[in-house]
């Protein structure tokens, strides 16, 4: 009888301790989230309001997730075009991450609007029209979207990578970014890193900018799955919330995060659309565009997302090919 009472008391104490841990975890999460929220200023999406049309992404099948990433600096005005357009691909079986950057001047057929630069799709119909445009031209299904207001980029980066991100700046960068970045190996923090990825007044023009975006995204991804970032996750989400509009649910975020951490994912494969030797620079009624070989790029995109071995990465020499 005494042994039975001791067992019940031990179980009661165990459940009590477990309950206290859960309560403490909730308090910590709420406090850290609100702490992060207080660091954010007037983010574009702070009131959880959006004027976007409903997003009708493809049903999620276990194995692969495609997220449409749209960078915007509209500052609230209507009709702003996307400044960066990527597809993030995650394979749940291999924990492999890939990103596809679609150049803003890529000349495509936008449903109901005809031939336009692809960055106009966001201005015409938000993430849903971008999704339809990608599906129509490249036959790729996207499950989710995330629109990032560049105003919040520096704050998010400084929380994910408080020690900065190391880059090798090839030449002086200053025009159009509100700062001067001198050449050489440097460690950049939030505002500087934003200037680094947005600068495009160099010999590679927008091609160089896309290359830098892919470089920084890969490095930030490695920082984001560190133990330090997991501890700061509630605060990071609090800071990011007013600057990101997304339909990615928390369950999916945690699934991807867990997979990357447990799978010890390293590196990130990247692709640029249009690929090398698949486009011509032209001037048409909507301005300077990249007139692409659609079938060649569709094939390259399909192979890149489906193949798990021997993927090719775009090199600097390929970036200037046309």
Image (tube, rainbow, N blue to C red):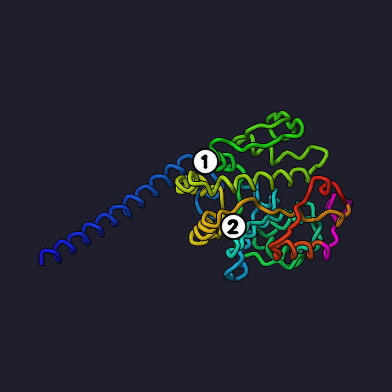
Prevailing SS of the magenta stretch? strand
Q: Going by the image, does 17 lie left or right of 319?
A: left
Q: Position of residue 101 (x, y in %)?
A: 72, 53
Quadrant in the picture for residue 175: top right
Q: Which residue is mark 2?
A: 51
Query: Which part of the image, by quadrant, shows the N terminus?
Result: bottom left
Q: Going by the image, does 176 lie left or right of 288?
A: left
Q: Is residue 282 magenta?
A: yes
**Magenta range:** 281-296
Determine the secondary structure under disc 1.
helix
Q: Residue at x 46, y 45 (%)?
A: 232
Residue 27 in view: yes
Q: Position of residue 239 (x, y in %)?
A: 50, 44
Residue 53 in view: no
Q: Nearer the viewer, residue 25 or 144?
A: 25
Q: Residues within 10 Å of mark 2 (few under 14, many from 20)?
A: few
Q: Position of residue 295 (x, y in %)?
A: 83, 66
Q: Nearer the viewer, mark 2 or mark 1?
A: 1
Q: Position of residue 202 (x, y in %)?
A: 80, 37
Quadrant in the picture for residue 89: bottom right
Q: Which labelled disc corresponds to residue 79?
A: none
Determine the secondary structure under disc 2.
loop
Q: Are marks 2 and 1 in contact (CB under 8 Å)?
A: no
Q: Residues within 10 Å of mark 1 (few under 14, many from 20)?
A: many
Q: Is residue 119 above or below residue 157?
A: below
Q: Is residue 252 magenta?
A: no
Q: Which labelled disc corresponds to residue 159?
A: 1
Q: Residue at x 79, y 65 (%)?
A: 299
Q: Residue at x 20, y 59 (%)?
A: 10
Q: Is residue 189 above or below residue 219?
A: above
Mark 2 or mark 1: which comes first in sequence?
Answer: 2
Q: Is residue 185 above or below residue 79?
A: above
């Amino acid at each position: 009888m005494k042994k039975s009472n001791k067992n019940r008391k031990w179980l009661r104490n165990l459940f009590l301790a477990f309950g206290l841990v859960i309560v403490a975890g909730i308090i910590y999460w709420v406090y850290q989230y609100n702490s992060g929220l207080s660091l954010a200023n007037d983010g574009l999406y702070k009131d959880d309001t959006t004027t976007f049309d409903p997003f009708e992404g493809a049903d999620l099948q276990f194995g692969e997730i495609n997220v449409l990433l749209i960078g915007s600096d509209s500052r609230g005005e209507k009709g702003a075009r996307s400044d960066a357009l990527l597809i993030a691909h995650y394979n749940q079986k291999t924990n492999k991450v890939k990103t596809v950057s679609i150049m803003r001047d890529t000349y495509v057929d936008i449903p109901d609007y005809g031939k336009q630069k692809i960055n106009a799709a966001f201005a015409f119909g938000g993430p849903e029209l971008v999704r339809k445009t990608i599906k129509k031209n490249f036959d790729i299904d996207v499950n989710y979207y995330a629109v990032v207001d560049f105003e919040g980029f520096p704050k998010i980066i400084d929380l994910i990578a408080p020690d900065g991100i190391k880059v090798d700046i090839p030449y002086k960068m200053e025009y159009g970014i509100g700062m001067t970045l001198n050449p050489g190996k440097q460690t950049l923090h939030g505002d500087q890193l934003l200037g680094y990825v947005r600068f495009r007044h160099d010999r590679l023009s927008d091609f160089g900018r896309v290359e830098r975006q892919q470089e920084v995204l890969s490095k930030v991804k490695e920082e984001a799955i560190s133990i330090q970032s997991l501890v700061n996750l509630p605060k990071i989400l609090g800071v990011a919330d007013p600057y990101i509009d997304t339909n990615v649910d928390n369950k999916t975020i945690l699934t991807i995060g867990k997979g990357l951490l447990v799978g010890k994912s390293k590196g990130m494969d990247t692709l640029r659309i249009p690929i090398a030797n698949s486009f011509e620079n032209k001037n048409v009624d909507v301005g300077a565009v990249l007139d692409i070989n659609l079938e060649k790029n569709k094939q390259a995109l399909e192979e890149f997302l489906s193949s798990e071995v021997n993927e090719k990465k775009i090199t600097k020499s390929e970036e200037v090919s046309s």
